[in-house]
Amino acid sequence: MKKKILFFFSALLLIGGLVFADAEKDYKSGKPWIDSNLKENVVSSQRPSPKDDYHLYVNYDWLLKNEIPEGEKGINSFSQVQKTVEGNIIEVLTAPDLPGHDAELVQSLYNAILDWKSRDALGVKPLQPVIDQIKNIRTIDELSDFITSPEKTFLVPKFVWVGNTVKPADSLSYITQIGFDGFMLNDAAEYKKRTDVGDRYYQAGLYESKAMLTRLGYSETEVEKMFNDMLVLETKLAKKAFSNAQMHSPDLIRRGNNAFSAKRVASLSPGFPLMRFIENNGYGEAKEFLVPAPRRLSVLNRVYKKENLELIKAYMIIKTACNYSGLLDSQAYDAAVKAENMVIGSKGKVEDKKMAVQIVRNMLSTPLNKAYLERNDLSELKKRITKICQDTVAIYRNMLEEEEWLSEKTKEKALEKLDSIRIHAVYPEKWIDYTALELKGLPLVECIKAIVDFDRKLDLAHTNGKVDRTLWLNEELLIANAFYYQAENSINIIPGLMGSPFYYEGMSQEALMGGVGVIIGHEISHAFDTTGAMFDKDGNFKNWWKRKDFKAFKKRAAKLIAYYDNITVWDGMKSNGTLVQGEAIADMAGMKAMLRLAKTIPGFDYKKFFEAFATNWRGIYPVEFEQFLNYNDPHPKFYLRTNVTVQQFDEFYDAYDIKPGDNMYLAPEDRILVW
């Protein structure tokens, strides 16, 4: 089951507009290129030569013409495709004659979200009893009773969560995982060395906490004290927590693959009532537990003491209030949006219909997909995309066969993995059944609670069970994206991506290959990036490499990491090669596969191909969001996804007559292709 994150139920929605954080910084000081994701950099520049800054050369007119819409985190090719898809979704959610239980579910949730009259009449009443229960806790025993009672703690942080996931070493089996709450400042690293991003999270969280809790009778002084007490507790909890950058490190797979017996788990938590929590949430029969961060359990047990009771209560009150804000009345929702704007540098808010679509898509993806397909016949699209995926796999096979640095033994295993890739194109043939879920007539908070309870029951059924490979691990189809899943060894090319510039009727062969073709190649390449390479053809965490080959692979990746590390985004900020290595490897390998195909096509126009590729990555963001992405996003910045990728290929140099001394030139010995 996909673990759903309630994006719209906290302060920190990643939406935005263009607001510059620090007027003293020189945002044009990037090297070797300016960050053209920042509109001000484009406005103050002239269109460069393709020899100087290829991304800006291709996208200059689009970047000048477009502005970040009200309430959005930015605008890019993906968001423009998403806008069209969301329009189609609204037709589904408002169609009076669409039959079936799935349509009833998604329309009930959509209507509950937009029923501001009922939401405003309730105000903060749904939150009041939850806060009162926390406030009235007097002892650690009472705290334990509360934390281990799932019926009382909806949207209350409980330090840990429990749920089933695919077992890393056995992709056909489920294992019960123990995870941990996130941090108010977003990243454990912020509690060791605060950045500008952490400062913005602090101010936003404090603002939202005051906006919510003063409505429940707290004074601003009391809220500020609780907020800072919460941070004192989180500082303790962050000491052994993985940072966001570490969470994206390939090494985390190995470090986090800790399968423990129930007895061992109990021994790790002598103070915090973990086993009682597991039992009361329905997972008491689990035979084995995945504990990616056992040291966090040790810290939690040291913190979970009588002397910290007031800090713990502050932690729970503050974060519960923020978790509820997006679900309550218009005043609470507006406070949540303002807090988000403070973090990301955005302004205004999205239209209510768009906000509602995003919540429905996140919470009820399967019923929404099924209702969407009732209204939209995508069977022909499924055939076409399946064929393109199959053709790309065949191209990739030839590419792998020619890798001279791989031994024949490792190459054989790589080809086995490639041939075993599952192609998930457009929509699955089998779906999770939601007929037991009922939402009609429920107010919004009760709708969300019912969905969360239903999903938990689905998940409980997986305890100690086997994975049904006829189901897709992720049934999210209506988002402009594509995915690779190691546990399935699957590429997922979904209808939410099917729009201009990625895929559209009448596009040229060059545009097709530079659009969805490169993206399909990219997703295949994730099977062989620095994380995917640690999983075998069946999705198991298992070594299939000869030692010398893996050493050579890591050496090639290290060269890529070093190159990205030396790129200056702007004054005082560098790109993070370790963070973006997997996506950068996939970008380059996906392009290499398409360029191999191009060699077989008479009269192929390489300029059209490279321009189509650059068009994929056009985008405009606030500087605050760009800064956030630099610390947290495993994808290279858009302008780097264009420029660094094309730099690696002779075909680009030939198409644009790039020579030594040109800014886009990278000497052959300095190029960083891993595959």
Image (cartoon, rainbow, N blue to C red):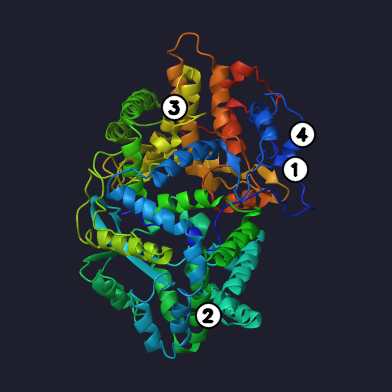
Q: How many marks?
A: 4
Mark 4 residue type: Ser
- Residue count near mark 4 (Cα–Cα under 10 Å), binned few <14, some 14–19, many ≥20: some
For mark 4, give the secondary structure: loop
- Work out whether residue 212 or residue 410 is closer to the camera in this orientation and state it: 212
Residue 252 coordinates in the image, percent (x, y)? 42, 55
- Residue count near mark 1 (Cα–Cα under 10 Å), binned few <14, some 14–19, many ≥20: some
Q: Quadrant of residue 559?
A: top right
Identify the residue under disc 4. 45
Query: How far, Cα to Cα, is label 3 from label 4?
Result: 32 Å
Query: How far, Cα to Cα, is label 2 from label 4?
Result: 49 Å
Asked whether the residues under the numbered discs 2 and 4 touch, taking CB atoms below 8 Å apart as contact, a structural biologist would say: no
Query: How far, Cα to Cα, is label 1 from label 3?
Result: 34 Å
Camera-nearest label, 2 or 3? 2
Identify the residue under disc 1. 29
For mark 2, give the secondary structure: helix
For mark 3, give the secondary structure: helix
Q: Quadrant of residue 409?
A: top left
* Mark 4 or 1, nearer chain start: 1
Identify the residue under disc 3. 517
